Image: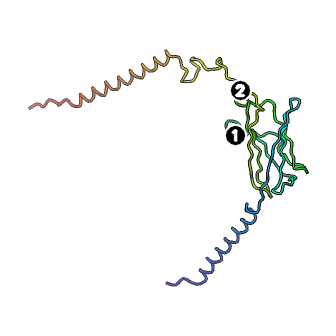
Amino acid sequence: MKVPNYLDMRVLKVFILLGIMVLNNSIIYGQDSLEDAEISLSFTDENDVKTITALATDQDGLPIEELDLYFYVVRTFSLLPIGDIFNTTDENGEVFVEFPNDLPGDSEGNVIIVVKIIESDIYNDSTLEIIKNWGLPIILEDSKVEKRSLWAAAANAPISLVVIVSLMIISVWYIICYILFKLYKLSRVKPLVDD
């Protein structure tokens, strides 16, 4: 059976349209034409005001104007944004962000500061991470360690409660096993047959 020519032409037209759509999307949204930007950070701490200064430059070393930079501090499960909603570079390629004084760090007060370029029309996405000793040190005291009590977590339950519950579970299993054993023995008994 021969396939009509107009079906071949329809299939060809569909493939041509799909190719044009993919080509246009790759031209419009393609990452190949974007440039790399370099970010350098400097830190100042004067009169209890901690300031992060970011300088954005292009590949030729010229400052980048009106580039949005996003500042974060790494927390346990996510990134905590700091600074304004939009931190845009000025004509010198600089942006200044005030660091909060009340952020907890690790035991030494270290925090990880992250600066990102995200979804720029001209520059590739990039991330810069710096460890800085600007957080409040966290000191774990022995008095805050949870002690054994009824309202404590299972690992800190009172020993007497653990023993009583364990004995109850063992005794219930013993009774279940005893009943099953008796039922098994009863099923093995042969009935008396009257002749």
Residue at disc 1, secondary structure = loop
State which quadrant residue 28 falls in. bottom right
Q: How much space separates mark 2 and mark 1, taking CA atoms?
A: 19 Å
Image coords of residue 168 (percent x, y): 42, 20
Q: Amino acid at mark 1?
A: Ser
Disc ID at residue 104? none
> Three-letter amino acid code at disc 2?
Ile
Q: Classify 168 as above or below 192.
A: above
- Residue extending furthest front? 60
- Which residue is label 2 attached to? 138
Q: Earlier in the sequence, mark 2 or mark 1?
A: 1
Please tell me in which quadrant of the rendered image residue 54 appears.
top right
**Is 156 situated above or below 91?**
above
Q: Position of residue 132 (x, y in %)?
A: 76, 36
Residue at mark 1:
78
Contact, mark 2 vs mark 1 (Cβ under 8 Å): no
For residue 76, above or below residue 32: above
**Total numbered circles:** 2
- Under circle 2, the secondary element is loop
Q: Nearer the viewer, mark 2 or mark 1?
A: 2
Q: Nearer the viewer, residue 78 or 195?
A: 78
Report crowding for label 1: few under 14, some 14 to 19, many 20 or more residues within 10 A (C-alpha).
Answer: few
The residue depicted at 70 percent of the width and 23 percent of the height is 139
The C terminus is located in which quarter?
Answer: top left
Q: Could you tell me which residue is drawn at 77 percent across and 45 percent down?
A: 115
In this orientation, which residue lies closer to the viewer: 195 or 95?
95
Residue pictured at 67% horizontal, 38% vertical: 77
Residue 192 % position (x, y): 14, 29
